Each structure stands twice: as C-alpha cells, then as structure tokens.
Image (cartoon, rainbow, N blue to C red):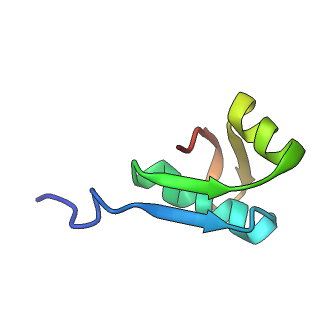
Amino acid sequence: MQNKFENSRICVVGIGGVGGIIGGALARTYPHVTFYARGARKDAIRSKGLRIESEYLGDFIVNPE
C-alpha cells in the first residue's frame, strides 16, 4: 500500500526543541522535509544533519532538504 503522503512536501519553521524533534521525526519518515533556519543553526544542519536524541524515538540523524 502506497503512503498517501509520500509525495507531500513539509516545511518546519522554528527549529527549537519542539520543532526540531517533530521535524526530525517527520524527516525520518517522509522524503521531502525542509527546515527553515538561519545563521549558525542553518550551517550546522547543512553540514552535520539534524541530530535527535530521544528516549522515546531513539537517537538518529536526519539530513533534510
């Protein structure tokens, strides 16, 4: 069964603690997730990816669009 959201595009604005973990979980599941960030945070996500450390979701790194 094809996921009906497979071709959807998601943009996460506000990459703080809450936006980061929700956006990270979305980016781990869906292929087209974009994060809107500026400055040093943008540069860090671009070069190293977004690292999520969670007891509930586990630890992982995503590389959003």
Which of the two residues, 30 or 8, is positioned nearer the viewer here? 8
Q: Measured from the top left, where is residue 42 in percent x and y?
A: 77, 45
Residue 55 falls left or right of residue 60: right
Residue 23 sits in which quadrant? bottom right
Q: Residue at x 27, y 57 (%)?
A: 7
Q: Is residue 38 left or right of residue 23?
A: right
Question: Percent from the top left, x then y, of residue 11?
Answer: 54, 63
- Which residue is pictured at 80% across the width and 65% down the height? 17
Residue lying farthest to the top in this orientation: 47
Give 33 or 38, whichever is nearer the viewer: 38
Extreme-left residue of the structure: 1
**Residue 12 vertical position relative to residue 46 in the rendered view, above or below:** below
User: Quadrant of the rendered structure where residue 8 is?
Assistant: bottom left
Asked if residue 47 is positioned above or below residue 28 in the image, the reply reads: above
**Horizontal arrangement in the rendering, residue 18 relative to residue 1 (left or right):** right
Q: What residue is rendered at 56% in x and 44% in y?
A: 64
- Name the residue located 49 percent from the left edge and 54 percent from the top edge: 33
- Residue 5 location (% of width, % of height): 29, 65
Q: Closer to the camera, 1 or 7?
A: 7
For the view shown, which residue lies furthest in the right direction? Answer: 40
Q: Is residue 51 visible?
A: yes
Is 2 left or right of 11, judged from the image as shown? left
Which quadrant of the rendered structure holds the N terminus? bottom left
Q: Can residue 24 be seen by looking at this rendering?
A: no
Q: Position of residue 12 (x, y in %)?
A: 61, 65
* Above or below for 28 versus 63: below
